[in-house]
Amino acid sequence: GQSLEQPSEVTAVEGAIVQINCTYQTSGFYGLSWYQQHDGGAPTFLSYNALDGLEETGRFSSFLSRSDSYGYLLLQELQMKDSASYFCAVKGGATNKLIFGTGTLLAVQP
Amino acid sequence: DAGVIQSPRHEVTEMGQEVTLRCKPISGHDYLFWYRQTMMRGLELLIYFNNNVPIDDSGMPEDRFSAKMPNASFSTLKIQPSEPRDSAVYFCASSPRTSGGAAKNIQYFGAGTRLSVL
């Protein structure tokens, strides 16, 4: 089967840096994605890693280590508007499905 | 493009009633996905379509749930009869395909339908 683990909650202050980890177990691997969801809103795509290493998109970066079945999302210069849930998702096996983790609720405090 | 459009945004119904949720994917996207989100179970994939054809419905919880995609610009998810445990937010998402025909890893979600079954 396929499963993903990420912390349920993370708290940080404005201006700080926070890292949200994700470990996964899949039969086959076709990339790790990250989505952001504000309360009551639609999940929105943030980043995607197919290969090992760091991908940077503005204040957000995502890292992948396929040998460790591990990735993380790094958020820098935190702003209040970054308070949201963050989901990692994997596409594994011979399928077009994304399997989502249970989400990490990030609370940014002033 | 207006993005993925879902209707209604909110639906309140009584147990036993039929519920129909609607979705218009982004034009040109070959893949359409229906998800259900609850606090207990998180974001679950119910079914997905490729070029209007249902490919994997293994996530559909029961025969009470059915989904159709009569054309490339419209899909429905129907629950009949509805039960209180069906209360959740239902999302539709669409995705373009890669040059090899697979779905890209990026999915575009609609705003969701918040369903309450009393």
Image (cartoon, helix red, strand yellow):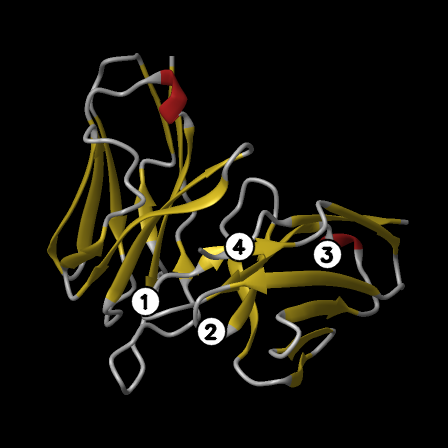
Residue A61 spot, x, y in % from top left = 70, 76
**Residue in the image at 20% along x and 43% along y:** B76
| C-alpha separation, residue under disc 2 versus residue under disc 3 | 29 Å
Q: Which residue was labeled with disc 3?
A: A82
Q: Which residue was labeled with disc 4?
A: A3
- Mark 1 or mark 4: whose residue is earlier in sequence: 4
Horizontal arrangement in the rendering, residue A108 relative to residue A94 (left or right): right
**Residue A95 marker:** 1
Q: Please determine whether, in this image, residue A93 is positioned above or below residue A10.
A: below
**Residue in the image at 80% along x and 59% along y:** A79
Q: How many neighbours does mark 1 have within 10 angstroms: few (below 14), some (14-19), or many (20 or more)?
A: few
**The C terminus of chain B is located in which quarter?**
top left
Circle 1 or circle 3, nearest the eye: 1
Q: Are marks 4 and 3 on the same chain?
A: yes
Horizontal arrangement in the rendering, residue B68 relative to residue A70 (left or right): left
Q: Chain of mark 4?
A: A
- Identified by mark 3, the residue type is Asp
Residue B42 spot, x, y in % from top left = 52, 41
Q: Are marks 1 and 4 on the same chain?
A: yes
| C-alpha separation, residue under disc 2 versus residue under disc 4 | 12 Å
| C-alpha separation, residue under disc 2 versus residue under disc 1 | 10 Å
Q: Chain of mark 2?
A: A
